[in-house]
Image (cartoon, rainbow, N blue to C red):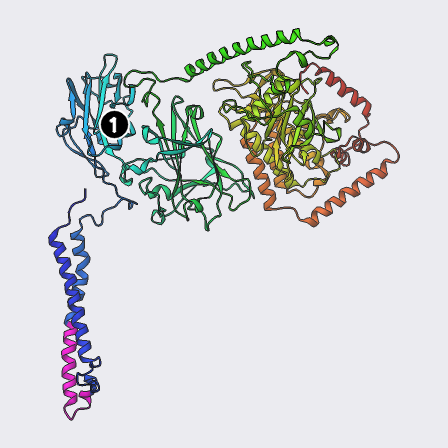
Amino acid sequence: MKERPLEGFVLVVKRINAEAAHFASRFSFHLSFHFLPEPPSGNGKAPRKNALTSIAKSPAGGMPKLKKKLKSIMAVIAIDRFFFLLLFLLLPLLAAFANPAAGQPQAPPSAAQFTPDDNFLIDCGATSPVTMPDGRNFKTDAQADSFLYAEEEARASVPSAPGVPSPLYLSARIFHGEAYYSFTLARPGWHWIRLYFFPVNSSDFELTNAVFTVSTNALVLLHSFNIDDPAKWLLKEYLVNATSPHLTLKFTPLRKSVAFINGIEVVSAPDALVTDSAATISPVGETNGLAKWSYQVVYRINVGGPPITSANDTLGRAWVEDEQFLQLKNTAKDVAVNPSIIKYPQGTSPLIAPNVVYATAGKMASAGVENPNFNITWLFDVDPSFAYFVRLHFCDIISKSLNDLYFNVYINGLMAISGLDLSTLATGLAMPYYKDFVLNALIANERITVQIGPMTARTGTIDALLNGVEIMKINNSVGSLDGEFGVNGAMAESRSSSTRRVVVALGFAMMFGAFIGLGAMVMKWHKRPQDWQRRNSFSSWLLPVHTSNTSFTTSKGGSAYGSHKSGYTFSSTLGLGRYMSLAELQAATKNWDQNAVIGVGGFGNVYIGELDDGTKVAVKRGNPQSEQGINEFQTEIQMLSKLRHRHLVSLIGYCDENSEMILVYEYMKNGPFRDHIYGSNLPPLSWKQRLEICIGAARGLHYLHTGTAQGIIHRDVKTTNILLDENFIAKVSDFGLSKDAPGMNQTHVSTAVKGSFGYLDPEYFRCQQLTDKSDVYSFGVVLLEVLCARPALNPALPREQVNLAEWALQWKRKGLIEKIIDPNLAGTINKDSLNKFVEAAEKCLAEYGVDRLSMGDVLWNLEYALQLHDSNPPEPAKAEKQAESKEEEKSSAGAASGSESSPRERAAASGSPTLAAEVATTPVISQSVENSTTMANELFAQLAGMNGR
């Protein structure tokens, strides 16, 4: 509480103001009397002339009168000026005495004031009052004794303790049996409950062994609570809606121990703090009834700014900085403005969060590339047994104009807000906006991730920001915020028990359906046609249900997904895509027209199709003779159904009718990346285009490795599995061989070797131990393929050139890597950019996985290579000159070889322009193609037992 100003000094200040006004009136009077024109006379005659003029025109003696009058005027003015100047100099000094707080450091001005109707503050165990740094006064035990009901209690205190942030922790009240603090509320409604705990050192009690429960009339706050660290202090903060006029805090010791408490706050909270509805993200919608729940504050984060103490928050809240929760700290940059410029829009209460929260933010850091596309991620660990209330705070303090900033917000990998436009929602810049979400226990699942990132569409400045995060635990079905038991001992329903009931119900339903199906089959059997034995299949007449409505696809556990019709979607618990009928896909591909085939893979043919709504799709139809079967089909569906990323191909639907295995993807107009590097007549890609495509693929793989809780290993990274859309945006595809990454206590996944020759990680091949570094090795081969424009394996080449990775690294060690690059790139690459690119590829291809880069590091190196190229691109004239010299080299070498079949010609025949570039600068190799092909065949014979493709 502020002290009341001294009334005597206030009177002095008022006297000063009165004297100043008196001087102004006197000075104005003298001027008007001696210098200003006279007012009109009452008889209608002309106004009297100016006094000075009349005196000057009077008979002799006019001048002495004027001088006398002027002297008197000047004397009055001099006295008044002196007196006014003296008062002016004394005014700040007197004002300082009148305001004792002047000159002392003040907290930033609060956006709003709130006076709580209930304000119970108790320093338990204390014998003298404590005033907190924020000015709040806590009562002693003696002053708060009327609130306590306890049979057996004691006190403990210490003069000081290292590391504790407040004197409230230095004393405690200890209870041997049940104890109650009962508060009569002046106004029922939302209340803060803050409990302070610290096991103070006591010769009579070992508080680190204390185990107890804390509850209210209908809510369990703490269950079997214990602090076993003597140096640890805790503040437990709750927000409860007290509907009765009495609020009771009950402390119950357990296991023949004691209970203790260091400090208690029960303070009214504003009604505007929690509305009655919030958004949900799975399923997308809105939930109501938030006022019926109680909450425990788990995290309160000031993003991009320093910690905020209760002294700087109107409601006494504390905010911590976000650094410990921020993943990849180099992705975010802190920004701040003066809190005074923050203006709350109409309808938004300033009590939601103080202006100092909205005056700081975390935004996208500069990636040094033209079109940055990455997310900033914050990670928060939570108890998986509860649902959570998440409030995100935003304030556009970085834009220079309206409608220029649009970005996406994700929670646990799911889209929470798409295209957030703060200037429209908040009706201006530097105006706060917040959004509330409720996450059920299935979505929260041990951790909550909050991500912000730019929109894929170019709609303005590429950036994103976040100002604050609040995460609060929601009580469970029995009114508990800690543990499974309620106040009356009732147990909350766990996921396992609810799942058990669902399984039992499904079991009865399946058994009932089996009896009906068996009866129908018996009836069908008696009505079977005479020529049934000559038919290809008995299913068309025997089965009671038409096959177009059934699904054979099974989950990992082996349970059937059930029947589906075209156009229906899977249940949200499975999270799979749309089920499509065979007839629908036959119509889309014109009955599997061979002219519609756009690709052939290990799984089968890929057709271009068009759905009824005009959407173009890529339809991959499984080949019954393929080595890949139902396992790969299921893996592809399960993986793509839980992955959503700009650089991963999206699964639209699937079909398993009549034993078919068909996957439907978004259509990628420009096809596989490899077709644009070599082996086709497509125009060659520039170095910048190749870099951007590699960066996109690296982002997709990085998301696979880190974007889910466990991570996913692709296991078949190659240029044919990197597809390009109409804008040459790269997307990783073909997840049939993918595996979940190793768990927390594992270093690898032991599995049979699968993949593609030339891209296989040698360590994985030798040990059959799969890690995410296996994908990194394969991606290193892709980088060399992009640079050299030749296949990863080419048996038609001499033995030392068959394997691209080994051959290219040899040239790298010689320092002559530029001799084997794609001739189409000659003279068009910045040398520093090339060196950084090759350096990244070399580190990807390290012999042992521990020595390789992570995909995040690979991505950083590629973006840096692009930045180097953009900052200093080669001169066009120089590039043309180098290209011409290359052509002359080829011509002269060709003329010198005569009619003999040269290695360069053999290279051209094999479709390898890089070999031609190499042979132009190296001696002719005499070994025949036939011999090297034989050696390569022997190599493949040794690998024939490997299960791959």
Task: Please state if 788 lies on the left or on the right of 767 as rendered.
Answer: right
- Quadrant assignment for the N terminus: top left
Task: Specify the amino acid type for callout 1.
Answer: Tyr
Q: Mark 1 = which residue? A: 196
Instruction: Pick whichever, 207 or 28, lies toward us.
Output: 28
Image quarter where the C terminus lies is: top right
Q: Is residue 697 above or below residue 534?
A: below
- Residue range of the region highlighted in magenta in the rendering: 54-78
Q: Provide residue 575's location: percent of width, then percent of height.
A: 52, 25
Q: What is the residue that sits farthest to the left in this orientation?
A: 8
- Residue 441: x and y in percent read 41, 24
Query: Whole-percent x and y of residue 813?
Result: 66, 31
- Residue at image position (54%, 21%) is 741
Q: Is residue 158 visible?
A: no
Residue drawn at (76%, 44%) of the image: 885
Quarter-of-image position of residue 321: top left
Looking at this view, is 506 or 824 the one in front? 506
Q: Residue furthest bottom?
A: 59
